[in-house]
Image: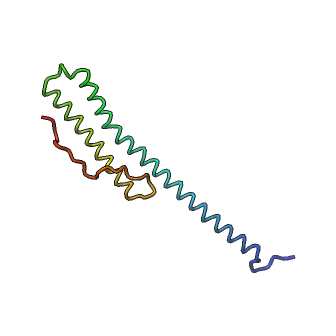
Amino acid sequence: MTQPDYPTSDSAHDDTRIDALQRRVEELERELRESHTRDSQRRVTLHRIRSPLTVVIGFAETLASQGTVMTEDRLTDRLNRIITAARRIDSMLDELGEQQDRCPVSAPNSGRPTQPSHPSKTVE
């Protein structure tokens, strides 16, 4: 017995199922790519925040152990470096919050203001 030249009800149903499965595979592949992108962005963001945070911790520890024997100029320099690094962290957290605001799938905004107020730029 030969196969008919037109699709039978079973082959039409199979084609529909195959098409649906192919679409689902494509969706899963896209979701996986997006997930890898988010993970990569998360790692970069964590690294960008940790770098200045390490500076803040290091200089604060130095001040805690040597602050009383430092000259005023050296102490001011160390405090200004701490302030600069802390502001970098603050700015990065603002950027992260703005990214979360633009992407409703992400975690909710931390509620931080977008423009932090800083009374002074340097220690005098």
The quarter in which the C terminus is drawn is top left
Q: Residue furthest top?
A: 69
Query: Where residue 20 sits: x, y (%)?
Result: 64, 67
Query: Where residue 79 sits: x, y (%)?
Result: 20, 32
Is residue 123 positioned above or below 26 on the image? above
Please identify the quarter of the rendering in which residue 57 is found.
top left
Name the one closer to the observer, 73 or 106.
106
Is residue 4 positioned above or below 111 on the image? below
Name the one closer to the observer, 118 or 2.
118
Please identify the quarter of the rendering in which residue 7 is found.
bottom right
Is residue 50 positioned above or below 22 on the image? above
Please indicate whether residue 59 sits to the left or right of residue 22 in the image. Answer: left
Query: Where residue 88 sits: x, y (%)?
Result: 27, 43
User: Which residue shows up at 38% across the image and 40% down it?
Assistant: 47
User: Which residue shows up at 67% across the image and 67% down it?
Assistant: 18
Query: Where residue 104 sits: x, y (%)?
Result: 43, 58
User: Which residue shows up at 38% across the image and 45% down it?
Assistant: 45
Please indicate whether residue 41 sits to the left or right of residue 57 in the image. Answer: right
